[in-house]
Image (spheres, rainbow, N blue to C red):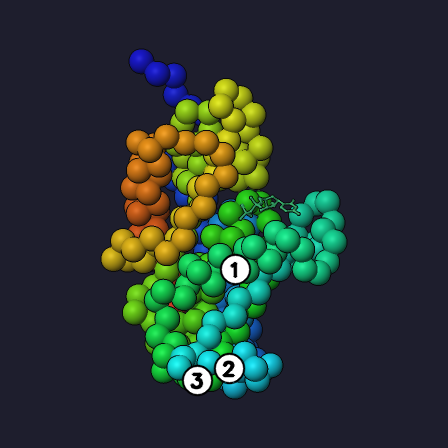
Amino acid sequence: MAEKFNRPDGRELTELRETKAKVGVVPNADGSAMFQQGKTIAIAAVYGPKKMHPQHQQDPRTGQLRCEYNMLSFSVSDRIRPGRNRRAMEISEITKWALEPVLMLDKYPGQVVDVHINIIQADAGTRCAGINAAAMALAHAGIPMKEMVSSISIGKLDKTMVVDLTKEEEDYHEGEGPTDIPISMTPSGKVTHMQLDGKIGVKQLQEAVDMAKVACQNILEIQKKALKDFIEGDKK
Ligand code: UDP
């Protein structure tokens, strides 16, 4: 019998870290949300739809989504140099790809919806937490969406598949080492984003997608509850 794989924080292989979500955390924004997974905390704020500036980027056929992901300098113990870098630019772009397929932006020709994601504390999975927060903030802003998007990182540590990697797990160095597969999905099972950092075979990649499907269903319930709690709180 295979030996049981022990995760550093004692979680089951398919167990999420403690997950919390809250809507309406930035009162001046048109929509906002916080998404926390363990020690990773993302805040998303949505502004718009509004007229696209610079004007030459306006598209008369449709509205556009602009995403900016930023990890704040105090979000990890080694201070990060503030400002744009290649990693932040890449994550901003993939966040846009993950969210765009569910947004009905054709209702806003010539306009833009800005999404600002700030990671205030980072312990891996920040791109997924940012996408989860942004999806809630877009719904809060009232941007018409075909469905929600939920995001999770699936990992392979040596040969064992696990859900929701911590930074300690991302740095695992035994056997085949770590593989990180962030996946974003809609409730109907459409994969809107998938990345792969490491090595994996086809069979285990399919297993990763199946694990993401279950994890994303759990995250969706947390996102929906946060939106419902906000609406009910507003009525009081
Ligand atoms: N990280 C860091 N400094 C950096 C970038 C990342 O300490 O400049 C840490 C941080 O905890 C982050 C983790 O490394 O969450 C994993 O980063 P990765 O690029 O894999 O993206 P993420 O898993 O956060 O989406």
Query: Does residue 227 appear anywhere in the picture?
Result: yes
For the residues marked 2 and 1, what is the alpha-carbon distance in whole angstroms?
A: 18 Å
Note whether ligand 1 is within 8 Å of mark 2. no
Q: Residue 116 location in percent, x, y? A: 56, 68
Q: Quadrant of residue 220?
A: bottom left
| Residue sitting at the far front | 56
Q: Is residue 161 left or right of residue 81?
A: left
**Of callouts 2 and 1, which one flags the residue occurring earlier in the amino acid sequence?**
2
Q: From where the camera sits, is residue 12 visible?
A: no
Task: Please tell me which residue is depicted at 47% across the width and 52% down the height of the picture.
Answer: 128
> What whole-number distance in Å separates the C-alpha atoms at marks 1 and 3?
22 Å
- Residue flagged by tag 2: what amino acid is it? Gln
Q: In the rendered image of this protein, does residue 185 appear above or below residue 156?
A: below
Between disc 1 and disc 3, the foreground one is 3
Asked whether 76 or 199 is in front, the reply is 199
Residue at 46%, 75% in the rendered image: 64
- Circle 2 packing at 10 Å, graded few (<14), some (14-19), many (20+), is some
Q: Position of residue 51 (x, y in %)?
A: 52, 86
Residue nearer the viewer, 192 or 35: 192
In the displayed structure, would residue 212 be above or below residue 173?
below
The residue lying toward the viewer, choosing from 7 and 142, is 142
**Residue to which mark 1 is pinned:** 93
Which class describes the residues within 10 Å of circle 1: few (<14), some (14-19), or many (20+)? Answer: some
Residue at which label 2 appears: 58
Q: Give the amino acid type for the residue marked by disc 1 in the picture.
A: Glu
Q: In this figure, which residue is indicated by the disc labeled 3? A: 60
Q: Which x, y percent locates residue 8?
A: 52, 30
